[in-house]
Image (tube, rainbow, N blue to C red):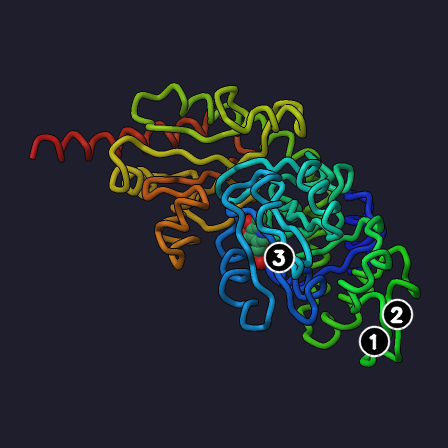
Amino acid sequence: MAVLEQRVTELECGTAALATASGQAALNYAFSNVADGGGNIVATPQLYGTTHTLLAHVLPKAGITGKFAANDSAEAMAAQIDGNTKALFCESVGNPAGNICDIEAIARVAHAHGVPLIVDNTVATPVMMRPFEHGADIVVHSLTKFMGGHGSAMGGILVESGCFDWMKHAERFPQFTQPDVSYHGMIYAERFPLYPFVARARSVLARTTGAVLSPMSAFLLLQGIETVNLRVERHVANAQTVAEYLKSHPDVAWVEYAGLKQSRYHALARKYFDGKAPSLLTFGVKGGYESSKRFYDALKLIKRLVNIGDAKSLACHPASTTHRQMPEADQLKAGITPETIRLSIGIEHKDDIIGDIAQALAAARGMRVVQAAE
Ligand SMILES: Cc1ncc(COP(=O)(O)O)c(C=O)c1O
């Protein structure tokens, strides 16, 4: 586990990391650590569904409330900040919306208000971007996804940049700057000046609540990380090919992919990813919910599986799976319509992926022809 922590610390150019049993555990620890004793976390609305549930429904019972901005702009985030805000939070690339956050602008807003920026970098991976280079203070990953790459082990990690000055904001963050009665009166920011956040998360949260990573999972995740650089290259190239194919297909209503020039996130893709985009894309089949469902059920090579980042291509219908607990209005805010299909494009040969999509679109079209005749 220590080797995994060191490796991800180096990949993200941080000072220390804490590995956890899952990505959700890492997020739970990140929020609980920064807002110990209560407070709010200002977040973008486009989040992985379970993270939204954690911030909107679970943590509020422990006094930590998620405040969701109207959109992912720095201005919308700034509008939600108040005297009780403990951190800003976003996904560098949102799952499933595929939106790209302007980390630099959001970090500037966070720091102007004396709070850190926490970034979930699961979808982008440090191969595509290192949030610390753009001002983020804490990075969180679900290692279950691209980093592990094979869906064979769950894991998460939180990494610290070492740059946030907790002592300067000592009143807001007494958990790092005052003696901890549960740990020999330790003052984390004095004892571990380069990584007080990780030190406290390890000695208070992981030790007492126990969401630690198993050694076997650490081994499997380390094996995955050996090839992540190569895999991400192929993921990205395949996703661009698939997005262009879908964009030109007459049965496709819309495609959201930041790698396409028409995308409203393409300027940010150019800023952060050299015009490319991670291999997560969403689209809708013409004909709405039923057509998209028919497409989904007709897939053969692409697995219908609620995961992302596997070497295998995966598809998901968020409205009936990951986001189904959310009211429809919140789903729309999170970028999900009833017909949205999310694809996590894998590293298979591109012709095989396109072939599967083509036959599934034909199956969906077949159903529309029957419906029209009835
Ligand atoms: C962006 C993001 N963060 C966190 C998680 C949660 O990770 P885990 O499944 O490892 O708990 C997910 C899972 O899909 C995710 O997509």
Q: Secondary structure at mark 2?
A: loop
Q: Which mark is residue 180?
A: 1
Going from N to C along the chain, the mark reached first, 1 or 3, is 3
Percent coordinates x, y for residue 209 in the rendering? 68, 75
Q: Secondary structure at mark 3?
A: strand
Left or right of 290, for residue 94 = right
Q: Is mark 2 within 8 Å of ligand 1?
A: no
Circle 2/circle 1 CB separation < 8 Å: yes
Left or right of 239, for residue 225 = right
Q: Which mark is residue 187?
A: 2
Left or right of 360, for residue 225 = right
Q: Dividing the image into 4 quarters, which one contains the C terminus?
A: top left
Q: Is mark 1 within 8 Å of ligand 1?
A: no
**Measured Cα–Cα span from mark 2 to mark 3:** 24 Å
Percent coordinates x, y for residue 328 in the rendering? 35, 51
The residue identified by callout 3 is 41
Residue at 13%, 35% in the rendered image: 371
Q: What amino acid does circle 1 point to?
A: Asp
Left or right of 341, for residue 364 = left
**6 or 334, which is in the foreground?**
334
Q: Secondary structure at mark 1?
A: loop
